[in-house]
Image (cartoon, rainbow, N blue to C red):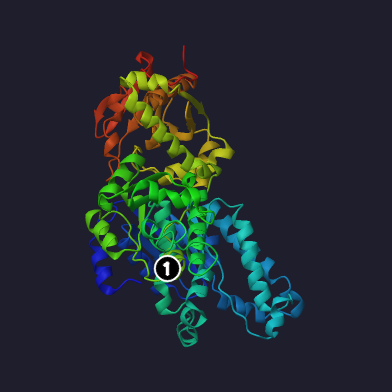
């Protein structure tokens, strides 16, 4: 974990000016935990202030609408119900009552969630439960429902199921930390009995990292692309020297290591993470295992962009980044060669470069512990992301052969559609607010439950946009949330767009259809605001380019009575 020197360096980082607040409620001592979480968040650039509630006051804090917790107005509430305290409650029960322990505890947690929902807009970070097997029944504990081991495992399972029904609840997986560290390093009995701290001091950084990882995902710090070396990274050996039959890939020997690593990468791809290749090699040789080796798990269709040449890898990664048009800080570069890692790390400070173990057998375990790919939502559209980017390269080929930009745009045969928010799209809409950084006018992050609430609130007008063309379907690419301000004015609370569709007339399509939507709702003025961040300078003048009047202080307005529709080659509902 972090050394003191690293922590000092972290505090010198550019910490986000936007303040986030978290309240920690536990049935165990959490003072040190609160300090470590706040410090770790700042190390990651998150401006977090933590309120640590009094010991074992969860119910009292949540039932009282005027409690210190609610007065703090937290953005997040971390609920840490320790297994040690539950074990004490379990032991006090009669044997017949022990059979209902897991369901009783789940109902208690649901009660907490409901009270928070009634009194606060805070997101709930719910810790799951580490295990205690007191061996009162020996190995038979896994079979008999009056053992604590049986009940705590049942509680974790029921908790996972119930959280699926609560969009405002996000899991913090403490059990995985206990498994990773072992019981002796997670829990210190002397510390617990003397201070009521259930988590050992040395385990606190792991606990806080799990919390901070979720906060990073909530604030848009997500990894979107893995750039992969090939030789001795995806397979053993050097394909250019050893030939197709000489590389290690398959079920035998070290080949099994690389098969499992590729299976994990395939899972990331299916979850929506883009895979790219950056190899020092001849392209035809580098591609041969993907095409011809029957035991390769990854195929060329799994790779969004394939770069194999003899240029330096930093330059090639910059080319990949420019081609994909996503932030460099959302890239992870994986290479077995320490020279290449150091080169990329020095030339591209924003990129994440894990310091890979020397033995490939440790690759997968190491990367899983790093937890670089945290998310807080998953939409079915994520599975289509690789295909969408591959189609984008076909569009670029068309652009290179077109005689003019107008010819190119006409040749795409684009069709756009605007629809109001609907439940089937809530997860994807929320995800876009969390992931979009460059084309995002105010960079307001929303969770799925926020999107549901906004959609059902008459105070708002909502719209999402899809785009397709001759090469494929881009899917959901833009989101608009309008807040009704008075009888004539609506305010653009959120306007964001996927950078994949920029400069194709989608911005104009959105404004054209938005004006029609606002007019149908009886309003005559649209007001927008641009809030500058380190990543959204590309849209600093978007309102003026769309015909809005600059009113100063980054506020813009559009009188729709005199609005003249903007030129676009996207066919859609507003065409006359």
Which x, y percent locates residue 85? Answer: 57, 77
Residue picked out by circle 1: 360
- Specify few, some or many for label 1: CA neighbours under 10 Å numbering under 14, 14-19, or 20 or more: many
Q: Nearer the viewer, residue 316 or 46?
A: 316
Residue at 45% across, 85% down: 191
- Residue drawn at x 39%, y 55% is 216
134, 22: nearer the viewer: 134
Q: Quadrant of residue 527?
A: top left
449 to the left or right of 566: right
Q: Quadrant of residue 114?
A: bottom right
- Measured from the top left, where is residue 180 in percent x and y? 49, 73
Look at the picture and state if 206 lies above or below 513. below
Which image quadrant for residue 484?
A: top left
The x, y position of residue 532, in whole percent, is: 27, 41
- Foreground residue among 538 and 145: 538
Asked whether the viewer can see residue 452, the reply is no
Q: Position of residue 221 (x, y in %)?
A: 37, 52
Q: Secondary structure at mark 1?
A: helix
**As drawn, is 400 to the left or to the right of 8?**
right
In the image, 128 versus 258, the foreground residue is 258
Residue at (65% x, 62% y) in the render: 158
Q: Is residue 388 above or below residue 177?
A: above
* In-image side of 323 versus 413 (left or right): left
């Amino acid at each position: 974990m972090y050394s003191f020197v690293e922590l000092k360096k972290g505090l010198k980082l550019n910490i986000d000016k936007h303040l986030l607040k978290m309240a920690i409620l536990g049935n165990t001592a959490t003072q040190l935990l609160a300090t470590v979480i706040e410090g770790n968040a700042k190390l990651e650039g998150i401006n977090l202030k933590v309120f640590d509630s009094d010991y074992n006051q969860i119910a009292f804090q949540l039932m009282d609408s005027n409690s210190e917790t609610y007065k703090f107005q937290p953005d997040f509430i971390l609920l840490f119900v320790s297994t040690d305290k539950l074990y004490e409650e379990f032991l006090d029960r009669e044997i017949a009552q022990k059979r209902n322990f897991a369901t009783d505890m789940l109902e208690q947690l649901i009660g907490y969630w409901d009270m928070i929902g009634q009194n606060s807009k805070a997101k709930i970070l719910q810790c799951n439960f580490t295990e205690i097997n007191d061996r009162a029944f020996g190995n038979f504990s896994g079979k008999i429902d009056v053992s604590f081991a049986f009940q705590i495992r049942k509680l974790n399972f029921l908790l996972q199921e119930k959280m699926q029904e609560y969009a405002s609840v996000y899991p913090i997986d403490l059990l995985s930390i206990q498994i990773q560290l072992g019981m002796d390093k997670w829990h210190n009995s002397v510390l617990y009995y003397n201070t009521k701290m259930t988590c050992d001091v040395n385990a606190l950084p792991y606990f806080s990292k799990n919390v901070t990882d979720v906060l990073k995902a909530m604030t848009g710090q997500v990894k979107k692309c893995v750039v992969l070396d090939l030789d001795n990274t995806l397979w053993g050996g050097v394909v250019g020297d050893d030939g197709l039959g000489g590389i290690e890939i398959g079920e035998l020997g070290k080949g099994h290591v690389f098969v499992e690593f590729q299976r994990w990468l395939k899972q990331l791809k299916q979850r929506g993470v883009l895979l790219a290749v950056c190899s020092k090699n001849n392209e035809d040789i580098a591609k041969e295992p993907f095409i011809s080796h029957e035991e390769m798990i990854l195929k060329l269709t799994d790779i969004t962009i394939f770069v194999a040449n003899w240029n330096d890898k930093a330059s090639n990664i910059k080319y990949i980044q420019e081609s994909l048009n996503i932030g460099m800080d959302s890239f992870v570069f994986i290479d077995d060669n320490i020279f290449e890692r150091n080169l990329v790390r020095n030339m591209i400070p924003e990129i994440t470069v894990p310091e890979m173990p020397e033995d490939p057998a440790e690759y997968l375990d190491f990367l899983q512990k790093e937890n670089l790919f945290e998310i807080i939502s998953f939409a079915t559209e994520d599975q289509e992301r690789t295909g969408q980017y591959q189609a984008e390269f076909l569009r670029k080929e068309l652009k290179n052969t077109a005689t003019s930009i107008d010819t190119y745009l006409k040749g795409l045969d684009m069709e756009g559609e605007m629809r109001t928010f609907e439940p089937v799209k809530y997860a994807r809409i929320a995800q876009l607010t969390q992931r979009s950084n460059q084309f995002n006018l105010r960079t307001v992050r929303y969770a799925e439950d926020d999107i549901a609430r906004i959609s059902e609130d008459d105070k708002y007008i909502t719209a999402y946009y899809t785009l397709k063309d001759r090469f494929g379907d881009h899917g959901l690419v833009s989101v608009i949330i309008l807040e009704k301000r008075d009888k004539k004015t609506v305010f653009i609370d959120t306007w964001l767009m996927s950078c994949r569709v920029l400069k194709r007339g989608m911005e104009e399509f959105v404004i054209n259809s938005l004006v029609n939507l606002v007019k149908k709702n009886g309003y005559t003025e649209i007001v927008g605001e641009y809030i500058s961040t380190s990543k959204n300078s590309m849209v600093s003048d978007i309102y003026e380019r769309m015909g809005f009047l600059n009113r100063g202080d980054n506020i813009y307005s559009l009188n729709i009575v005199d609005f003249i529709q903007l030129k676009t080659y996207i066919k859609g509902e507003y065409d006359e």
